Amino acid sequence: MKLKLPAPPLPPSFKPQPRRPGEKELGPAGTAKEAGISAVDWLDERTSLSGAARWMMFRKVPKGTNWFYTLGSATMFAFLSQAVTGVFLAMYYRPSAAEAYESVRYITNEAFLGEFVRGMHKWGSTVMVILVFLHMGRTYFFGAYKYPRELNWVVGAVLLVLTMLMSFTGYLLPFDQKSYWATIVGVNINGTGPLVGPYLNDFLLAGPDFGATTLSRFYAIHMMLVPGLIAALIGAHLYLVAKLGTTAPPWLKAEKDPELRKESA
């Protein structure tokens, strides 16, 4: 005969709170909701994250805000999509000159949902580049780069450069004829730059010429260096947006309060 062990007791914070006299008892859904609230309260009491979340999420929005203001959030979502799909692709990809192309063929033709994930990653990179340019264009034409948001404009410009670098380094990874020769052309163009051009050329190629370690260098830059920098700068970018706020569209003029005009007169 098997003995049935009792279930472990619930922590006090997960137990439903006592009801007031005459108050109806909660059903299963209400009990689960109350337990979730208690768990969130328990976590917040030990981390104090609610204050930071309120500071980040609840802020004043200028009049006239429209869909153009969602381009930054769309770009961040595109980056998150690239990060998630890139992790799954890295589980099968092999960054070596002898196995890279075969691993990409296996992902596309044989791995479960491999063609779907690779398609999301491939076209998502193009979408992210387009969204970054649209977001920078919106910021420029709306005058959101002016005082006191100059630093945020600089951070955005660096994010634009890093996005282009991530797209360039990822182009080589399938290691077919098109990506191979296109990368050689791109690196040679970088090498013609003044002063730092030759050093940048040697850094990207991991030597004076395209060799066996070039693919590994591009893979490391694409998978670890650039995404880490982008994630850190996105955090700084969001902090400055929450701190400084957003600008109203340029076609809206500030409303003048007649009472304030009387007092100033």
Image (cartoon, rainbow, N blue to C red):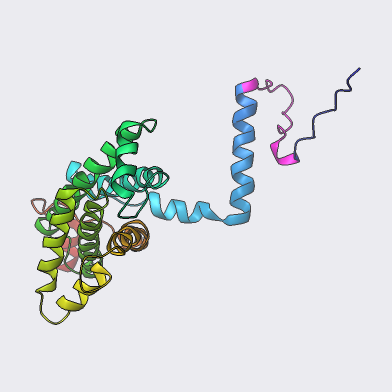
Judged from this view, the residue extending furthest toward the bottom is: 195
Q: Is residue 113 left or right of residue 16?
A: left
Q: Is residue 243 left or right of residue 182?
A: right
**Residue at image location 84% in from the left, 28% down from the top:** 6
Indicate whether 34 appears above or below 39.
Answer: above
Indicate whether 263 appears above or below 182.
Answer: below
The residue closer to the viewer here, 23 or 129, is: 129
Q: Position of residue 162 (x, y in %)?
A: 24, 62
Q: Which residues are magenta?
A: 12-28
Residue 195 visible in the shown view: yes
How many marks the image carries: the answer is 0
Judged from this view, the residue extending furthest toward the front is: 98
Q: Position of residue 87 (x, y in %)?
A: 40, 47
Q: Position of residue 66 (x, y in %)?
A: 19, 42
Q: Main secondary structure of the magenta part?
A: loop
The residue closer to the viewer here, 232 or 185, is: 185
Residue 254 visible in the shown view: no
Q: Is residue 85 left or right of residue 21?
A: left
Judged from this view, the residue extending furthest toward the right is: 1
The residue closer to the viewer here, 78 or 211, is: 211
21 falls in the magenta region: yes
- The quarter in which the C terminus is drawn is bottom left
42 falls in the magenta region: no
**Residue at image location 35% in from the left, 42% down from the top:** 85
